[in-house]
Image (cartoon, rainbow, N blue to C red):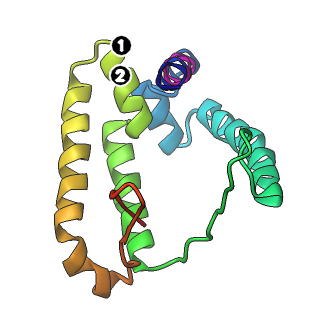
Amino acid sequence: MTLLYLALGTLFGFVLSRAGAADYDYIQGMFLFERFQLYGILATGVAVTAPGLWLLKKYGRTLTGAPLAIDRKSLNKGTVAGSLLFGIGWSLTGMCPGPILVNIGEGKVYAIAALAGALVGAALFGAAYDALQKPFGLPALKVTARGAAGH
C-alpha cells in the first residue's frame, strides 16, 4: 500500500508541477488577481472531490469497506488565526505544503527554507498547544488507538 501512496503522491506532484500550481509567479499572480488559472485548478479540485466526499459520508464506508466517520469541525479563533497564518505564508513563499515538496523535487533550493519554516512552525504550534488551547478555543487533543495525537 505504501508504494501505491508513493506513486499517487508522485503523480499528484507531477500534475501540480505541469499545471503551474507550484510556480511562484503563477501563485503570486493569483493572489494579485492577475492570473486566474489556479482558481480554475482549485475549483476543479473542489468539483471532483465534493461528490466523492458526499458519497463517503452518505454510505459511511471507504472504498475498501472500512467504516468511516467524518466529524464536522467547529469554527473557533484558532481556525481563523491558523487560516490567516497559512494564507500569509502561502502568499509570501508562493508555496503551501504540497508545492513545497514539488519545488524541492524541481530542484528549487529556496523551497528548503519554506519547508524548514513549515516544520518549525508546526513544532512551535505543537509545543505551545496547551497554552493556546483555551484562549483560541482549540479542541482537546485525542489519542488514537495507535498512540498518535489527533484532533
Dot 2: what SS?
helix
The residue range painted magenta reads 8-15
Give residue 103's mark.
2
Compute the Cα span from label 1 to label 2: 5 Å
Q: Does the magenta stretch include residue 55?
A: no
**At which x and y percent is residue 17?**
49, 18
Q: Which amino acid does label 1 sit on?
A: Glu
Tell me whether circle 1 and circle 2 mark residues in contact (CB < 8 Å): yes
Main SS, magenta residues: helix
Which residue shows up at 40% across the image and 22% down it?
102
Which residue shows up at 45% across the image and 26% down it?
22
Q: What residue type is labelled 2?
A: Asn
Query: Is 35 left or right of 104, judged from the image as shown?
Result: right
Query: Is 65 left or right of 3, judged from the image as shown?
Result: right
Residue 129 quadrant:
bottom left
Quadrant location, the C terminus: bottom left
Dot 1: what SS?
loop
The residue labelled by disc 1 is 106
Which residue shows up at 79% across the image and 54% down it?
54
User: Seen from this angle, which residue lies furthest bottom?
Assistant: 134
**At which x and y percent is residue 78?**
38, 74
Q: Is residue 124 or residue 66 the one in the foreground? A: 66
